[in-house]
Image (tube, helix red, strand yellow):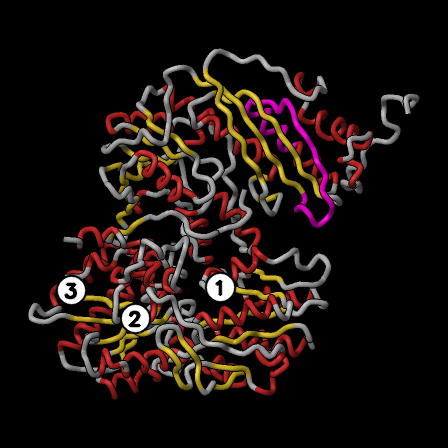
Amino acid sequence: MRFIDEFRDGELARGLAAAIRQHARGDRDYHFMEFCGGHTHAISRYGVTDLLPGHVRMIHGPGCPVCVLPIGRIDMAIRLVREAGVTLCSYGDPMRVPASDGLSLLKAKAALGRAGVGGVGGDIRMIYSGADALTLAQRNPQRQVVFFAIGFETTTPPTAVLIKQARALGLGNFSVLCCHVLTPSAIASILESPEVRQWGTVPLDGFIGPAHVSTIIGTRPYEFFAEEYRKPVVIAGFEPLDVMQAILMLIEQVNSGRAVVENEFSRAVTRDGNRKAQDLVAEVFELRRSFAWRGLGELPYSALRIRREFADFDAERRFAVGYEAVADHPACECGAILRGVKRPQECRIFGSVCTPENPIGSCMVSSEGACAAHYSFGRFTDLAEAP
Amino acid sequence: MNGVRKGYVRPLDLRQGRVDMTHGSGGRAMAQLIEELFTSRLGNAYLGQGNDAAVLPIPPGRLVMSTDAHVVSPLFFPGGDIGCLSVHGTINDVAVMGATPLYLAASFILEEGFPLGDLARIVESMAAAAGDAAVPVVTGDTKVVQKGMGDGVYITTTGVGVVAEGQELSGDRARPGDRIIVSGSIGEHGMAIMAQRESIGFAAPIVSDTAALHGLIAAMRASGAAIRALRDPTRGGVATTLNEIARQSGVGMMLQESALPVQAEVAAACEFLGLDPLYVANEGKLLAIVALEDADSLLAAMHAHPLGQRAALIGTVHRDAQHFVQMTTAFGGRRIVDWLTGEQLPRIC
């Protein structure tokens, strides 16, 4: 397949692996965090770790939109369905994230009555695109349709488009439960964490920066991290060769004592990003003062909400549902895993109580989650590690 | 009522007519539907007798029986429809046990309002598939549910066949050293359905591979190769089927990603939708576990059959207490090929 196979070429991978082995100094370790779930998935799916020398280690970051969604946000979505009787439209992955009372959107869906037949009662639908939710609202004017919008900067512009379309169509029965979050805030939170800053328990020599997010926001927002925290950042695509090339670039930066933002994904990312998309987002959304992330806690100015001018399409305002914080399962280590403090296999319930079929924590849900990726693709390596 | 003559006054309206509740009531409308729409198309001596059950001659051997419900959406897709799918699916389930499929039973759940013309097309497709396979539909049933309680039509088929004594094919017979063969390119049925649902257009559309495999299986058995197990990788795809066999047999497996046959269109559609062809349903492919020494002769026999031309050796069976199915990626790394989690593609067959 053109434009795909080129980025998964085994021959080129072996060449890059040799270059990495050659450049990685024997007298030190290298610890790089791949921020995005897309990178985590690529590393696990293609077995990239097998091609790296033992002292070049990858740490999984928090860049999986499903993983960072706290229980309280899923609870809000379920309350909208149960109490306000809306038709909630969600992508597939958030459907399986555990919520309070042993529920998830999937379980809540199964427990609902036959909604829609008599026109009463809530309803949950799995959709492939936010546009499906808008169509549903147009076809069912008697029902309130809410789009459960999650994701980092990549998915925010499409949500903005939906809201503007809904306004242009004069739809009174469409709204958005906005859970869009911001990448730079999460990176800052990790760099500011005591494990990285004070205790040094999470050694971090650099970041592989987001691919798709950066097509929107550009490379400029990361320059602060490179300068202020002296951490090299290489923006990389989601193909396995992109990841390996980025690792090589990070090693070279570390070796030469540099800390700058470099762009491996130059086929799609520019320094300034997509201005048009940024303008669209700025028109529809504004910063929240604070937003709760799973694992990272309440982070100031780390998420978006819908501007007052578009308040009619804001489900939080229309249905007056508030966010209530809920503690994670006590044994679940998703928080530590999202901060890079622990690896999935270091969680006591990984693979025993918590599996993709019965996820306890969010990282076991999405294929981009660190736990799900390790469980689905890489857990055979744990047996080799065991004494 | 006794005075009404046998022939119906007005034939079924296949152009405008729709299924209504009387078609399931047990009355004359139901009798007319069965006679004009089903029996006339599926016609054979057993069905034509019009009894509550078919009385059938059985050749010597052990009886093999399987049943399969079909709920695919959309009902018509490139390469087939729910009718031929319901025939192929059950024939294949019987055939992979090494049996010769003999007879089918079919039960239909029809939704009120379903166009009779579409139903006729579906039954014609079943009749053609059953005729080609020489496995007649010998008995059946129809029920009608109210509008909104079904999705057009659901079809359950049950198949019986016979297998000779001493012929043992079973998922628990894979042994370390055995080879794993797939009969052709994978993921076509699931992606044909999905491409249609998501309106993904290609210059040449992806066509479902739905097919009856008992002919290919007969050719494979005639080769004399020591086949341990056969299975058709439908829902959950090749990955899930191999995990089933690995667990049943208590072994591990190692696949070679570069050896997996995948059509370019299927690979592209999977890429586009974020799916893995290893987990996408097939309806006309089989996986064979065969003794190392017979792998080449079995492959040759498969290549000589029209449904096995792209058959490929894709992996090996080895000892593994964890029963992992693993894969050497084309990239050069190694990963697990795990059980399917959740629901990748709903309503696929």
Q: Residue at x 61, y 74 (%)?
A: A175
Q: Residue at x 44, y 84 (%)?
A: A290
Chain of the residue that carries numbered disc 1 in the rendered image? A
Residue bearing mark 2: A336
Asked if the magenta segment contains residue B134, the reply would be yes
Q: Start and end of the magenta stretch?
A: B124-152
> Which amino acid, mark 3?
Ala
Residue B160 or residue B25, whichever sits in front: B25
What mark, if any, has residue A101 been given in the picture?
1
Furthest-left residue in this view: A27
Q: Quadrant of the C terminus of chain B?
A: top right
Disc 3/disc 2 C-alpha distance (Å): 32 Å
Q: Quadrant of the N terminus of chain B?
A: top right
Q: Is residue B272 left or right of residue A307?
A: left
Residue B244 or residue B349, whichever sits in front: B244
Q: Residue B156, image x and y in percent?
A: 60, 34
Q: Nearer the viewer, mark 1 or mark 3?
A: 1
Disc nearer the start of the sequence (1/3): 3
Q: Nearer the viewer, mark 1 or mark 2?
A: 1
Label 3 residue SS = helix
> Which amino acid, mark 1?
Asp
Residue at mark 1 shares a chain with residue at mark 3: yes
Chain of the residue that carries numbered disc 2 in the rendered image? A
What mark, if any, has residue A19 been given in the picture?
3
Q: Residue A183, image x and y in percent?
A: 38, 78
Dot 3 crowding, Cα within 10 Å, few <14, some 14–19, many 20+: some
Q: Is residue B43 left or right of residue B195?
A: right
Disc 1/disc 3 C-alpha distance (Å): 51 Å
Image height of A279 relative to A346, above or below: below
